[in-house]
Image (cartoon, grey):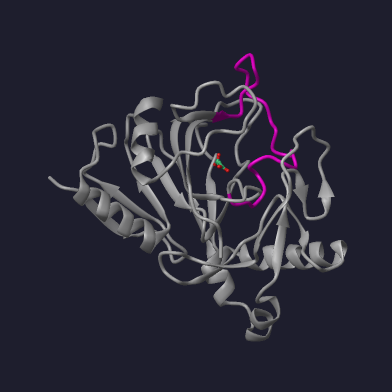
Amino acid sequence: MGLVIGPRLSAPGGVAITGIDLAEPLPPEPKRQILEAFRDHHVVVFPGQALTREQQYDFARNFGEIQPSSQPGSKRHDVAHVISNLDKDGNPVDRSSSPVGNYRWHTDKSWHAVPPLLTMLHAVELPPTGGDTEFANTVMGYAALPEETQRRIAGWRVVFRWGASGGTAVMTTRQDPPVDHPLVRTHPDTGRKALYLGNHVSHIRGMPEAEGAALLAELLEHATQRRFVYAHRWRRGDLVMWDNRCLLHRAVANYDMGKYRRVMHRSVVRGTVPF
Ligand code: SIN
């Protein structure tokens, strides 16, 4: 049986693809179908996958160059890296209040000059319930802005810096220089305009910092309304890949994080310079 593409999972996006084993090499025709589904639905779910970290890395490489993890302690770059709520002794800990954690709306590695095309997560260990990931469709968010706002923000550039959270900086020894990207970016495959913002934004170039940060906070609130959000409720074995060019996402702290383990394998594929 070939690959089966299900119905759209929600208005903002999402589709499930079955009938494929991602641990096997990916032939051209299924790859084309996956890319088409990815372009049309933004979040692609492959349920019931059993992949080693090496196999996930090989699958991700079908879509471009892998961006290595910037997490301290990530020693191997030729495998999917591990993200979890565990401390160094393997005990679950609640880090959901961290200002640089994945629990705030963000798009991955937005502080890079060439940020990612896509991210994929493979669910290895999950809490009994919860531990969801939410995705906000920023094409829908942009389209729903009043025309006057769309005109006003056209051409604005947002400064991203690791650890900047809308004007409040986190103390860090990291030296990543700030980068700026268009607030309204054009999706390279669909030509549609999307908002590009989220955690790690600092301010708007050429505008007083506090004023820019306040406007970005307002736009973020607009872009993450429930009507633009697909919430993925994980099952063990799901591999989910999503488009960082037209989505914000966040992990949801809707489980007892100090008690249950949540372990995911993650791969990130480099994109192109936003325009
Ligand atoms: C991420 O932000 O890349 C991970 C999200 C999650 O753990 O659900």
Q: Residue at x 41, y 64 (%)?
A: 189
Q: Quadrant of ligand 1?
A: top right
Residue 108 point in image, percent of width and height: 58, 47
In the picture, the quarter occupied by the N terminus is: top left
Q: Residue at x 70, y 33 (%)?
A: 95
Residue 135 point in image, percent of width and height: 53, 55
Q: Is residue 164 magenta?
A: no
For the residue pair 87 and 210, the one nearer the viewer reads as: 210
Residue at the far left: name it: 1
Q: Residue at x 61, y 42 (%)?
A: 254
For the residue pair 190 and 205, the one nearer the viewer reads as: 205
* Horizontal side, residue 201 vs residue 188: left or right: right
Q: Residue at x 62, y 66 (%)?
A: 223
For the residue pair 234 and 160, the one nearer the viewer reads as: 160
* Horizontal side, residue 86 vs residue 169: left or right: left
Residue 110 point in image, percent of width and height: 62, 50
Q: Quadrant of residue 47?
A: top left
Residue at the far top: name it: 89
* Horizontal side, residue 225 vs residue 28: left or right: right
Residue at the far bottom: name it: 148
Task: Give the magenta part as a residue range.
Answer: 83-107
Magenta highlight: main SS: loop
Residue 61 point in image, percent of width and height: 37, 39
